């Protein structure tokens, strides 16, 4: 699927600008959650143009790729078969002070 829908195969994503409505439609966000997500700069990259806000498609694609790589790394860390089995003592909090030797 192409985004925006009227873009052709030869459209350069560096020259495609999406407004807030287009970004929310791309990720399937509703209005309330979409505007909350777009304000959160730790979640979504900042717009390249302000007043009105516009996001470049190539930056959104790079952000998507980065998030997918992080998600895959987190999944591998959770399901690593070669990892040593954890014991109950590994799950307990570490002591704040070191024991003194007598």
Image: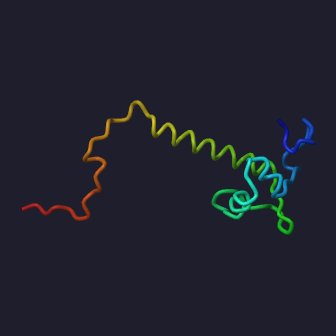
Q: Residue furthest bottom?
A: 51
Of residues 93 and 24, which is closer to you in this image? 24
Q: Where is residue 10 in the image (x, y as percent from the top left)?
A: 91, 37
Q: Residue furthest top?
A: 81
| Residue 101 falls in image quadrant | bottom left
Q: Is residue 90 above or below residue 38?
A: above
Task: Name the quarter where the C terminus is drawn.
Answer: bottom left
Q: How many marks?
A: 0
Q: In this view, does 8 lie to the left or right of 67?
A: right
Q: In this view, does 82 lie to the left or right of 7?
A: left
Q: Where is residue 75 in the image (x, y as percent from the top left)?
A: 51, 39
Q: Which residue is drawn at 82% across and 55% down?
A: 21
Task: Name the quarter where the N terminus is drawn.
Answer: top right
Q: Which residue is drawn at 70% across and 64% down?
A: 39
Q: Is residue 90 left or right of residue 22?
A: left
Q: Position of residue 40 (x, y in %)?
A: 67, 63
Q: Which residue is drawn at 85% across and 38% down?
A: 2
Q: Is residue 30 above or below residue 84?
A: below
Of residues 73 and 92, which is closer to you in this image? 92
Q: Which residue is drawn at 51% across and 43% down?
A: 74
Q: Residue furthest left?
A: 102
Q: Where is residue 96 in the image (x, y as percent from the top left)?
A: 26, 64
Q: Is residue 89 above or below residue 21?
A: above
| Residue 94 falls in image quadrant | bottom left
């Amino acid at each position: 699927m192409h985004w925006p829908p009227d873009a052709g195969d030869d459209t350069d994503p560096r020259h495609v600008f999406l407004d807030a409505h287009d970004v929310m439609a791309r990720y399937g966000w509703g209005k309330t959650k979409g505007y909350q997500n777009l304000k959160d700069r730790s979640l979504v990259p900042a717009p390249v143009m302000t007043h009105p806000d516009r996001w470049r498609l190539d930056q959104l694609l790079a952000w998507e790729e980065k998030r997918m790589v992080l998600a895959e790394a987190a999944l591998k860390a959770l399901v690593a078969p070669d990892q040593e089995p954890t014991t109950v003592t590994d799950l307990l909090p570490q002591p704040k002070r070191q024991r003194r030797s007598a």
